[in-house]
Amino acid sequence: MFCVDEAAPEQGLSGIARHLVDERSDPPRVERLQVLAGEGSLVLEHRYADERELAPGYRRPMKITTRWWSPLTSTLVRERTLTILAARVGAESSVPTWRPGAEVTDWRVQR
């Protein structure tokens, strides 16, 4: 497991977005996204689980658990789990050209 940290102080944003990546999978996949406040305390976390392949080379997590912590007391304030029962590729013609890190980064929830 390794982490990639992002910060954007030049845009007036304090804190860090930390991506925890499982390098053992092929391709490597993000297991968690954590948001750390300016002083380093954890305030938000997304945990991704139950990853499935929707089409060759196109994967998505089917379970996302989000947790919020109070920045003042570091106590857990809220937890929500989203379970996706069915998913499909939005534009199937783009699947053959999709690669990790490509510009295809948006997911849509459809009813």
Image: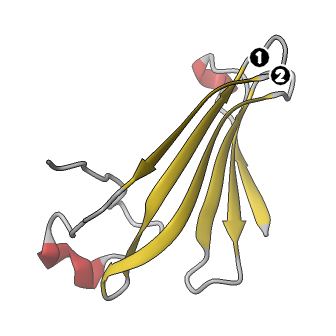
Residue labelled with disc 2: 74
Q: How many marks?
A: 2
- Residue type indicated by callout 1: Pro
* Position above or below: 80 against 12: below
Please give the name of the residue rendered at 31% of the width and 53% of the height, measured from the top-left corner. Answer: 107
Quadrant for the N terminus in the image: bottom right
Secondary structure at badge 1 equals loop
Residue 36: assigned label: none
The answer to whether residue 103 is left or right of residue 94 is right
Spot the residue most to the top.
72
The answer to whether residue 55 is left or right of residue 100 is left
Badge 1 vs badge 2, beta-carbon distance below 8 Å? yes
Residue 10 place in picture, x, y as percent: 64, 23
Residue 99 shows in the view: no
The answer to whether residue 16 is left or right of residue 110 is right
* Position above or below: 63 against 100: above
* Position above or below: 48 against 92: above
Residue labelled with disc 1: 71
Please give the name of the residue rendered at 34% of the width and 57% of the height, measured from the top-left corner. Answer: 84
Q: Quadrant of residue 69?
A: top right
Residue 14 shows in the view: yes
Render colour scheme = secondary structure
Q: Quadrant of residue 20?
A: bottom right
Disc 1 packing (10 Å; few <14; some 14–19; many ≥20): some
Q: Quadrant of residue 89?
A: bottom left
Marks 1 and 2, how far apart in space?
6 Å
- Residue type indicated by callout 2: Ser
Residue 21 place in picture, x, y as percent: 68, 65
Please give the name of the residue rendered at 15% of the width and 75% of the height, measured from the top-left corner. Answer: 92
Secondary structure at badge 2 equals loop
